[in-house]
Image (spheres, grey):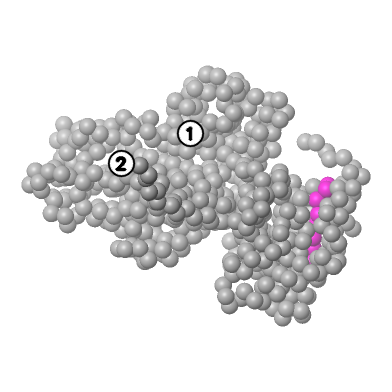
Amino acid sequence: MAVQRKKRKRRELFALGNEAVAEGALLAGCSFYAGYPITPSTEIMEVMANRLPLIEDGVFIQMEDEIASMGAAIGASLAGRKAMTATSGPGFALMQEHIGYACMVEAPLVVVNVMRGGPSTGLPTSPAQADVQMARWGTHGDHPIIVLSASNVQECLEMTVTAFNFAEKYRTPVILLLDEVTAHTREKITVPDPDEVEILSRVEPTVPPEWFKPYADTARGVPAMAPIGSGYRTHVTGLTHDVMGYPTQRPDEVKDAMLRLFRKIDQYYGDIQMADEYMMDDAEVAVVAYGSVARSAHLAVEQARERGAKAGLLTLKTLFPFPRPAVEKLTHRCHTVVVPEMNMGQMSREVKRVNNGRTKVRTINRVDGQIITPSEILKAIL
Amino acid sequence: MKAPQPIDRFEIRLSGLGGQGLITLGRLLGSALALGHGYYVTQTQSYGPEARGGSSRADVVVSSRPISYPKTENLDLLVALSPEACNSYYRLLKRTGILLVDTTLVKHAPTNVYLGLPFTQMAKEQIGNPMTINTMVMGAVTHLLPFADPKVMRKSLEANLPAKIREVNAKAFALGLKQAQRNFGDAGGIWAAAEENGAHSEDDIIV
C-alpha cells in the first residue's frame, strides 16, 4: 500500500548562534519570552520580539530588569506556557534568587546565559566561560540543576530544543550556557520540520480536581502539573512545602520533598548527561572541552593526529549534572587530560575531582577576553 | 547550485573602522558563499563596546569540509580599510596570502606587494554614497575569490538587502567588481603570483 508522505519543510539559514537559539525555542513550542536586553545575548530577544507576536497566543515582554524577567517567566510557566529568558553575566547574577524559586516550585523554563568577560560589567563584547560554577551553584540552598552548553550554531538550535524538553520532562529550570563566540558566529543551519523533532511537554493531571495533590510523588519523582486556572488546586510558595503545596517544617515532609527534588534528576543521569567523543578510540591524550573552545580543540586534535600524536576530544554538552561516566572512562585510558577553558579552572576542578589523582590533568586558562586558539591546545597535547 | 570546489580552510579578515559596515559585509559575503554556493562558512566578529568609532572586524572562514575553529589564525585574504587595521593584522597574513587595501585611507601599506583600490573615494564620487563602501569591497573580493561566482554573489547580495538600498548597493558591487577586474587582472594569475612571491620569501619560523 502506498503511503502518502508529507514533504518535509526544512529551512536553511545563515544565522547567528543567538538566532538559532530563538529558532530552537520556537520549534520547541516556546510561547512566552520575558527579558531585558544585554550584549552578547540581545539577538535572542530581538528574534523573539519579532516572531512571538506572529504566533497564536505568543507573548513577548520587555521587563524592567532581569529579576522581573525571571519572575514573569516563572509566572508564565505556572500558567502552562513554555517560557524562556536570555541574558548575560550581570543579568544572570540578578536572576539567581528566582532560579532558586523556580527549582522549589518546579517551574519548567529555560534560561540562556551568553557568557561574556566579567566580573561585573567586564568585557561586554568579548567571550568568557566564567559563569560555569555560577550556573551550578548560583542560587542558594541545596538544589539539583541541569546546565547545557553548545559549541556551534546548529547545536545552539538543537540544545535549546533539548533544554525545553528537559525542563518539561523534569519540571525544572534548565540553563543553557553559551559564550560570546558561539552566540556571535554565523553559520549555515538547517531548521528542521516541526514533525521531525521530538518535543516533550509537561504531564498534566488525569485525576478529578478534588483528588489532585500538586506535589505528590510519582515513580519519576516528577509531579503532574496543572496550569493555574484550569480548575485544579494551585498553591505556590518558595517555602518548603508538603504534597498539597502548603508550607511545612515537619522533618519527614521536608526530607521527602528535598530528596524528591534530587531524585527526579539523579535517577535520569543517563538521559541527561550528554558528551560527544571524537577520535577517542585509541587516544592517549584527551582534551575535555565545551562551548566554542571545543571547536578550537577539534582542530588541535586533527593537527595533532596529522603529526602522529594519538589525541582525542570529549566535548561536554551537558555541564551539570557533570558527565562523570564519560570523563571517568578517559582518565583510565589516557596518560594526560587537557582541559582548556576561558576561566581560571571552573570545569577542570570537576575533571580533577572525577580523575581522583589517576592521570595527569593539564589546564589551559585564558581570561583576557580572547578565545583559546587551536595552536595553544596543540602545544599542550604534544 | 554547482557542486562546490574543494577548498580547505580559506581564511578572510575584513578589517577597518566601526561604521564602515564590515560586519554587514561579513554577513553578506558569508551568506552568499554558504547559501548561494553551498560551502561551509563561519563568520565571526570582533568589535568594541563603543556605539561607533573604534576598530571593527569580521572574519570569514570558507571550506568545502565542516569547519571546526570558527575564527582565523593564518589569513589567505586580508582586507584592510584603515591604516591601523592594516598594520595590526598584516602579520597574520600567510606568506602566500593577498592584502587588499583602501588606497584612499591606507597610504603606507607595510609591504609593496598588495592590491588596492580607492574604495572610499569611489563610493563618494562615483556612487554618491560613502556608505556603499562595504558592498563595493564585496565586488572586489568576489573577483579575488576563485571559488566565487559573481552572478551568485550579486543575487545573494540583492536578496539580503532591503528594497530601499538595493539598487545603490548593486551598483556599488558592480563597480567594485569591474574595477578589480580591470586593475588586478585575472584571479588565477593573482594567486599564482602570490604563491610565487611566497615561495621566495624567508621561511616561516615554526613555533
Does the stretch in magenta take in B97?
yes
In the displayed structure image, the side of residue B122 where residue A227 appears, left or right: left
* Cα distance between the residues tagged 1 and 2: 20 Å
- Quadrant in which residue A47 is drawn: bottom left
Q: Is mark 1 in CB contact (under 8 Å) with mark 2?
A: no
Does the stretch in magenta take in A373?
no
Magenta segment: B95-102
Residue B106 position in % (x across, y down): 81, 65
Quarter the C terminus of chain A occupies: top right
Residue B72 position in % (x across, y down): 69, 48
Can residue B86 be seen here?
A: no
In the displayed structure image, the side of residue A333 where residue B147 appears, left or right: right
- Quadrant in which residue A104 is drawn: top left
Can you identify the residue that label 1 sits on?
Answer: A275
Q: Toward the viewer: B44 or A179?
A: B44
Q: Residue furthest right?
A: B200
Quarter the N terminus of chain A occupies: top left
Residue at screen point 65% across, 24% down: A310
Residue B65 position in % (x across, y down): 65, 43
Chain under callout 1: A
Residue at screen point 21% across, 46% down: A204
Identity, as a three-letter code, of the amino acid under mark 1: Ala
Same chain shared by disc 1 and disc 2: yes
- Quadrant in which residue A279 is drawn: top right
- Per the image, label 1 sits on a secondary structure element best described as strand
Can you identify the residue that label 2 sits on?
Answer: A169
Chain under callout 2: A
Helix, strand or loop: magenta stretch = strand
- Per the image, label 2 sits on a secondary structure element best described as helix
